[in-house]
Image: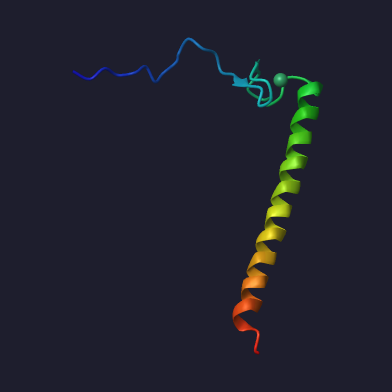
């Protein structure tokens, strides 16, 4: 006997959740308030900075490996 989990949630109207605080927002919105937008944008900025930093770190590592193996002595 296999029980099907109700995949259709017909009762819940179309909506999304604020990607910052999780409160329900209208389908067209992603964020519920200016406050959450600030939080979200700050988070994005920090994420981007971290990604760039990791990229630089990775490139430096690759470069040092490259020089370690290919520098003529
Ligand atoms: Zn929110």
Please, which colouring scheme is shown? rainbow
Left or right for 3, reference 58: left
Which quarter of the image is occupied by the C terminus? bottom right
Residue 67 locus on image (x, y percent): 66, 78
Left or right for 38, reference 16: right
Of the pair 22 and 50, the residue shown nearer to us = 50
Residue 4 locus on image (x, y percent): 30, 19
Q: Quadrant of residue 13?
A: top right
Ligand 1 occupies quarter: top right
Of the pair 2 and 43, the residue shown nearer to us = 43
Residue 29 locus on image (x, y percent): 69, 24
Of the pair 17 and 44, the residue shown nearer to us = 44
Is residue 28 positioned above or below 12 on the image? below
Is residue 5 positioned above or below 70 on the image? above
Left or right for 7, reference 32: left
Judged from this view, the residue extending furthest toward the bottom is 73
Q: Quadrant of residue 1?
A: top left
Q: Which residue is depicted at the point 77% across and 41% down?
A: 45
Q: In which quarter of the image is residue 18?
A: top right
Q: Which residue is depicted at the point 73% across and 39% down?
A: 44
Q: Which residue is depicted at the point 72% across and 60% down?
A: 56
Judged from this view, the residue extending furthest toward the left is 1
Q: Which residue is depicted at the point 67% across and 71% down?
A: 63
Judged from this view, the residue extending furthest toward the front is 73
Q: How many labels does the image show?
A: 0
Residue 25 locus on image (x, y percent): 66, 18
């Amino acid at each position: 006997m296999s029980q099907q989990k109700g995949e259709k949630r017909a009762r819940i109207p179309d909506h999304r959740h604020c990607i910052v605080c999780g409160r329900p927002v209208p389908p067209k919105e992603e964020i519920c308030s200016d406050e959450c937008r600030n939080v979200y944008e700050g988070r994005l900025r920090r994420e981007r900075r971290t990604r760039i930093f990791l990229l630089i770190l990775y490139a430096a590592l690759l470069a040092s490996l490259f020089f370690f193996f290919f520098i003529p002595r």
